[in-house]
Image: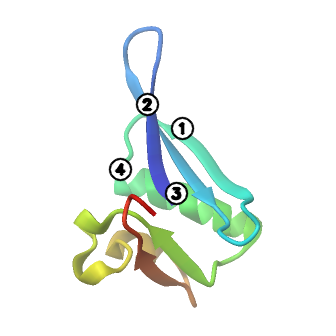
């Protein structure tokens, strides 16, 4: 999962894009535009994807700055109802 580029509306407001890619198949399971990439917005995008595609075996996030101990964000992991492990990747790969 990642919060990627910003989009700007005609009136100047900024939006963020939340993406999620299946690391094995490279299938895009999340592509959501939000006004603010809050924890609630990210969790909603994640739970919506889980409802459609199932619970992942592992979640990889590059948000190490908000992830104590090198694991995925505690807020993100609380979105998982069972079985998912979280881990963090460096932004470079």
Furthest residue in direction front, as rendered = 92
Q: CA distance from mark 2 to mark 4?
A: 12 Å
CA distance for labels 3 and 1: 12 Å
Whether the residues at callouts 2 and 1 have beta carbons within 8 Å, the answer is yes
Q: Nearer the viewer, mark 3 or mark 1?
A: 1
Label 1, residues with CA under 10 Å away: few <14, some 14-19, many ≥20: some
Q: How is the image coloured?
A: rainbow
Helix, strand or loop at label 4? It is loop
Residue at x-position 65% and y-position 69%: 23
C-alpha gap between disc 4 and disc 1: 12 Å
Marks 4 & 3, CB-CB < 8 Å contact: no
Q: Which residue is mark 4?
A: 38
Mark 4 touches mark 1? (CB < 8 Å)? no
Residue occupied by mark 3: 44
Judging by the rendered image, the residue that carries numbered circle 1 is 33
Q: CA distance from mark 3 to mark 2?
A: 16 Å
Local SS, label 3: helix
Q: Residue at x 23, y 64 (%)?
A: 65
Q: Of the residues under marks 4 and 3, which one precedes in the sequence?
A: 4
**Label 3 crowd bin: few (<14), some (14–19), many (20+), radius 10 Å:** some
To which residue does mark 2 refer? 15
How packed is label 2: few (under 14 Cα within 10 Å), some, or many (20 or more)?
some
Q: How many numbered marks are there?
A: 4
What x and y, as percent, mark residue 4? 46, 44
């Amino acid at each position: 999962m990642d919060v990627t580029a910003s989009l700007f509306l005609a009136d100047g407001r900024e939006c963020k894009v939340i993406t999620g890619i299946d690391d094995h198949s490279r299938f895009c399971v999340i592509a959501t535009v939000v006004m603010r990439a809050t924890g609630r917005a990210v969790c909603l995008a994640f739970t919506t994807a889980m409802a459609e595609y199932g619970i992942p075996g592992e979640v990889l996030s590059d948000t190490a700055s908000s992830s104590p101990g090198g694991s995925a964000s505690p807020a993100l992991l609380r979105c998982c109802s069972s079985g998912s492990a979280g881990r963090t990747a460096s932004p470079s790969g």
